[in-house]
Amino acid sequence: MYSAKKNLLEETEKFLSDYAYKIVYVPHEVIEDYNATYNVMCEDELITTNAAKELDIPHNEIWISEKWKPYAKYIIFHELREIYYRAKGIERDDAHEKAIEDQLTLWKDDQLFLKMVRDMQEMDRKTAEKKRRPKSLK
């Protein structure tokens, strides 16, 4: 299993090095609905998200909420794996799930990673709750 983890990390590090995407930390309020997103070229194909279009993210940038900076290595890894899978022709939702599987392969017992998952789930819950409230209560 160790070599599989090492290969996964090395492959992802090479991917980042080859494409030289710019990692940008933005105020949480700007990206709170998404936590992180991207608008990149990969293998001569534009790989983007609706969030990136909505936020007008420049080409070859990955945006991450500054709130999640302590978890940067996990988030950057996830976004890169998702981009990698999408470039291979896998649909966005499936690529997202495969990226999560890759994260778990590496960090399922990592306490900081598990804390990030809990923190993001809580923040997603709060964001969804805030959106459901009438405007007069916000």
Image: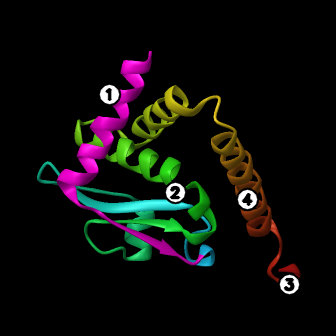
Of mark 4 and mark 2, the one earlier in the sequence is: 2
Q: Is 131 placed above or below 79 here? A: below
Q: Secondary structure at mark 3?
A: helix
Q: Is residue 111 left or right of residue 28?
A: right
Q: Label 2 near label 1: C-beta < 8 Å?
A: no
CA distance separating discs 2 and 3: 35 Å
Location of mark 3 (residue): 136
Give amino acid for label 1: Asn
For the residues labelled 2 and 3, say whether their Cβ atoms are less than 8 Å apart.
no
Q: Position of residue 82 (x, y in %)?
A: 38, 43
Total numbered badges shown on the rendered structure:
4
Label placed on residue 72: 2
Callout 4 secondary element: helix
Neighbours of disc 4 within 10 Å: few (<14), some (14-19), many (20+): some
Which badge, 1 or 3, comes first in the chain's sequence?
1
Q: Give the residues drawn in magenta, as a range.
A: 1-27
Residue 29 percent location from the top left of the image = 63, 77
The residues bearing labels 1 and 3 have C-alpha atoms spaced at a distance of 52 Å
Residue beneath the point at 50% across and 30% down: 106
Q: Earlier in the sequence, mark 1 or mark 4?
A: 1
Q: Which residue is mark 4?
A: 123
Q: Disc 1 or 2, which lies upstream in sequence?
A: 1
| Separation of residues labelled 1 and 2 (CA atoms) | 20 Å
Whichever of callouts 2 and 3 sits on the residue coming sooner in the sequence is: 2
Label 2 sits on a secondary structure element that is helix
**In front: mark 1 or mark 4?**
1
Question: Which residue type carries mark 3?
Answer: Ser
CA distance for labels 4 and 2: 16 Å
